């Protein structure tokens, strides 16, 4: 297990370097000049020259990249041009909110998608199978922003069961925190549940046709034991891959949902940074998101081995 983790980490290093080059290079291609925005309406030449010297924008691009990468490796993501706060401090404030929302949404997706996929595969061709597939397709087709607005109108405005927007820290009021997270988590989780259901159904159908499942049934094992212990366990590898990738997407892809429910998370941070041309924040957020994806893939590799020990030799 340790050897596998070390090999995966070695592969991650060049990937991180390439990601850093792309993040820094793409920032240079973005339209607009943050120095002009910082200089104000007067755009005094002396002020512009001072800011360019302060942020070393007169240096060649490779030198700028080297300085930036050196700061990143030392834990310094720079300062926000808009707020003059450390980028790492802003990320530390916003990231836990998005992680909590993503975790809640993933729990909703797993609780709905995986059992529905198993039932659909076991009852292939039945009315239940068709009903679950229609529900999954509906979850995939409904836009998150429309579903979020509908939830606010019905659940918050009409029924007055949950708050329509806002965020409360779990340290301040745990129950209120859960109440503010329920609707956004369901909005995000329903679409993911449809994706997980389709992949779970496909993986289970392949496993249930395998020889070892037929042998288990021939031995007279209980059908639930056959499905769970022999079927689901061997179908979990593609499900784990998908779930980890979807969780990584949630960290960066919950922008619309956070905007609709006024949740001060990662999505709102990067939207504000893009509109204000706060490139240090954009770089920091994108880099953290990329690192999150890489860590999710590493976690998936470890979970493969825990779920299916036969993969240890193949790894």
Image: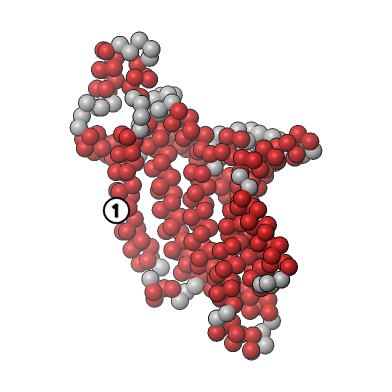
Label 1 SS: helix
Q: Is residue 48 above or below residue 14?
A: above
> Does residue 17 show up?
yes
Q: Position of residue 31 (x, y in %)?
A: 36, 29
Quadrant that contains the N terminus: bottom left
Q: Residue at the location (68% across, 76% down)?
A: 224
Q: How many marks?
A: 1
| Colouring scheme applied when the structure was drawn | secondary structure
280 lies left or right of 189: left
* Quarter of the figure with residue 81: top left
Point out the residue furthest to the bottom here: 219
Other residues around mark 1 within 10 Å, as few (<14) / some (14–19) / many (≥20): few
Q: Is residue 47 above or below residue 173?
A: above
Q: Which residue shows up at 68% across the image and 72% down it? A: 125
Locate residue 93, reporting x and y percent.
50, 35
- Say above or below: 59 vs 99: above
Instruction: Name the residue nearer the viewer: 214 or 265.
Output: 214
Q: Quadrant of the C terminus?
A: bottom left
Residue 149 in picture, x, y percent from top left: 67, 37
Can see residue 178? Answer: no
| 312 up-or-down from 93: above or below | below
Residue on which the image places disc 1: 14
Task: Please tell me which residue is depicted at 31% across the width and 59% down the height of the picture.
Answer: 10
Q: Return the residue nearer the eye: 173 or 191.
A: 191
Residue at image position (26%, 12%) is 46
Q: Position of residue 295 (x, y in %)?
A: 43, 54
């Amino acid at each position: 297990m340790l050897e596998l983790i070390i090999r995966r980490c070695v592969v991650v290093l060049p990937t991180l370097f390439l990601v850093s080059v792309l993040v820094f290079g793409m920032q240079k291609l973005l339209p607009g000049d943050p120095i002009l925005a910082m200089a104000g309406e007067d755009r005094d030449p002396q002020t512009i020259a001072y800011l360019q010297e302060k942020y070393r924008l007169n240096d060649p691009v490779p030198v700028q990249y080297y300085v930036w990468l050196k700061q990143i490796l030392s834990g310094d993501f720079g300062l926000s041009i808009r707020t003059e706060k450390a980028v790492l401090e802003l990320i530390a404030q916003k990231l836990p909110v998005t992680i909590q929302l993503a975790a809640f949404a993933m729990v909703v997706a797993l609780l709905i998608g995986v059992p529905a996929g198993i039932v659909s595969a076991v009852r292939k061709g039945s009315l239940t199978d068709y009903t679950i597939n229609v529900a999954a397709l509906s979850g995939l087709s409904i836009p998150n922003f429309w579903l979020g607005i509908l939830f606010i109108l019905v659940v918050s405005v009409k029924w007055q069961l949950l708050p329509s927007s806002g965020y409360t820290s779990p340290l301040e009021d745990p129950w209120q925190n859960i109440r503010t997270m329920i609707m956004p988590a369901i909005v995000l989780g329903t679409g993911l549940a449809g994706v997980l259901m389709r992949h779970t159904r496909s993986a289970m159908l392949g496993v249930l046709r395998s020889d070892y499942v037929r042998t288990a049934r021939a031995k007279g094992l209980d059908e639930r034991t056959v499905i769970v212990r022999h079927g689901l366990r061997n179908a979990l590898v593609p499900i784990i891959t998908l779930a980890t990738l979807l969780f990584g997407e949630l960290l960066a892809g919950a922008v619309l949902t956070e905007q609709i429910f006024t949740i001060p998370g990662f999505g709102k941070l990067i939207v504000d940074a893009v509109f204000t041309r706060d490139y240090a924040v954009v770089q920091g957020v994108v880099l953290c998101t990329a690192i999150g994806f890489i860590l999710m893939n590493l976690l998936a590799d470890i979970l493969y081995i825990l779920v299916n020990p036969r993969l240890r030799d193949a790894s």
